Image: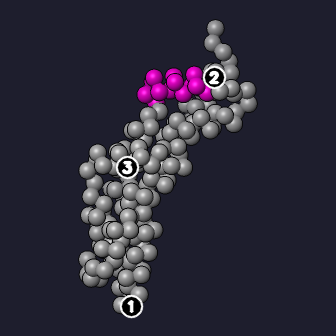
Amino acid sequence: MEDPVYRNLMNYAMRALSRRAHTSFELREKLGKRPYCTPQLEDQVLARLQELGLINDENYVRHAIEEAVRYKLQGRYKLASRLQRKGISFEETNTLWAEAGISEQELAREALKRAHKRFASVPPEKLYQRRAQFLASRGFSPEIIFELAKVSQKP
């Protein structure tokens, strides 16, 4: 007969996953807050969820990269910072970013292009600063920021 605490934890994890995808680190934290949860039960639940293909950190990172590039126009550092809070290492994020073959410079150019109206009323002496702040807030590397912030205001 199956342990009722294990079944309760599995149900809780399934409900959490039905709302949105989670990393194994996030689920471990959530499960750890449940009463009667032990580290052994956490491991059993996470192992079963991985076996079923319901949690996969690599797929989670790939999806986050796609979302950051396609919709949010965010750089590698912002994405890595956000994923680090969810238990994904900076190295893993960088590896998968490199595998995806994304040009961070082209992504930064597109972000500036889409935000060009924002800089229309900025005085020329402050334009470099504002563009650099914009790119930094999007998580682009300093080399890219220094290069693209100098480029003319026209998209």
Q: Is residue 109 left or right of residue 127?
A: left
Near mark 1 (Cα within 10 A), the count class, few <14, some 14-19 or many ≥20, is few
Near mark 3 (Cα within 10 A), the count class, few <14, some 14-19 or many ≥20, is some
Residue carrying label 1 = 125
Tell how many labels. 3
- Report how far apart the C-alphas of labels 3 and 2 lie in the structure: 31 Å
Residue 94's tag is 3
- Image location (x, y in percent) of residue 21: 48, 40
Q: Is residue 108 above or below residue 65?
A: below
- Image location (x, y in percent) of residue 81: 49, 55
Q: Can residue 71 be found in the magenta stretch?
A: no
Near mark 2 (Cα within 10 A), the count class, few <14, some 14-19 or many ≥20, is few
User: Looking at the picture, which amino acid does disc 3 mark?
Assistant: Asn
Q: Secondary structure at mark 3?
A: helix
| Residue numbers of the magenta segment | 41-54
Residue lying at 30% horizontally and 74% vertically, measured from the top left:
147
Residue carrying label 2 = 40
Q: Is residue 9 above or below residue 26?
A: above
Tag in front: 3 or 1: 3
- Image location (x, y in percent) of residue 74: 39, 60
Q: Can residue 42 be found in the magenta stretch?
A: yes
Residue lying at 31% horizontally and 60% vertically, measured from the top left:
104
Check the picture and name the quadrant holding the N terminus: top right
Front-most of residues 106 and 118: 106
Q: Provide the major secondary structure of the magenta segment.
A: helix
Tag in front: 3 or 2: 3
Q: Earlier in the sequence, mark 3 or mark 2?
A: 2
Front-most of residues 92 and 120: 92
- Report how far apart the C-alphas of labels 3 and 1 lie in the structure: 35 Å
User: Looking at the picture, which amino acid does disc 2 mark?
Assistant: Gln
